[in-house]
Image (spheres, rainbow, N blue to C red):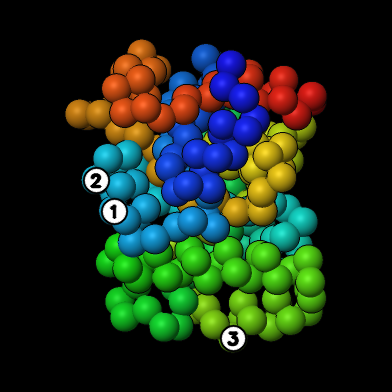
Amino acid sequence: MTSKEEIRRALESGLPVLIYDFDGREEETDMVFYAGTASWKTVYTLRTTAGGLICYATGNREANALGLKFQTDILRLDPLYKELVKAPSYKDEPAFSLWVNHVETRTGISDADRAKTVQELHNVVQEIRRDPQSAKESFYSNFYSPGHVPVLISRNIRSRRGHTELSIALMEYLGLERSVVFAEMLDEKESLKREKAIAFSKNNGFILIEGKEILKMVVV
């Protein structure tokens, strides 16, 4: 298994790690970057190489500090929209919260615009440890919704074991800010199969980590 130091070094140098969840769950692989190193090239790589929805994710503590709620909880407040809240085939409720843009973006969708939004989200999350109230004020002053970057919230690896929780648990294990940007890896017509993801990681020199390995790291 790849060492803790190697994984952290790769992420801090701007490289992604690939995370496969579990057999019997989504059985999908996400390309994950540490948001602290995100640039327009990060977004370009996620868009052109991974291909899935590009999302920003952080932990539940950080979300609580910013007053962020799960989209499912927001929808449940409306008597009509609450009918849309249903569990997906793998049973866990989605990790989605709000979709945002930073106020300094143009349309919000370009690689540069989405990178700006991700970078500023990371800065806000970093600020929480220093001054939670200032971070919250910064978030509500400098972002607007709806936007082009979905914010996902980790429910905690003990209660949900999706890519959001696996990625955030990995960052915590590595001693990095709980702040990532990722996208699911797609193939023609469907998600990239595990075997192809393994081959891709080897051919490109990227680290691939399985969910069961992350669980051993964090000792759930």
Q: What element carries label 2?
A: helix
Cα–Cα gap, marks 2 and 1:
6 Å
Tag 1: amino acid:
Tyr
Which residue appears at 76% of the width and 62% of the height? 64
Q: Which residue is more in the foreground, 88 or 179?
A: 179
Q: Is residue 120 above or below residue 191?
A: below
Residue bearing the label numbered 2: 48
Q: Are marks 2 and 1 in contact (CB under 8 Å)?
A: yes
Spot occupied by residue 12 in the image (x, y as percentages of width and height): 53, 48
Cα–Cα gap, marks 2 and 3:
32 Å
Q: Nearer the viewer, mark 3 or mark 1?
A: 1
Which disc is residue 141 wearing? Answer: 3
Which disc is residue 44 wearing? Answer: 1
Specify the farthest residue to the bottom. Answer: 141
Tag 3: amino acid:
Ser
Res 96 visible = no
Q: In this view, does 78 lie to the left or right of 115?
A: right
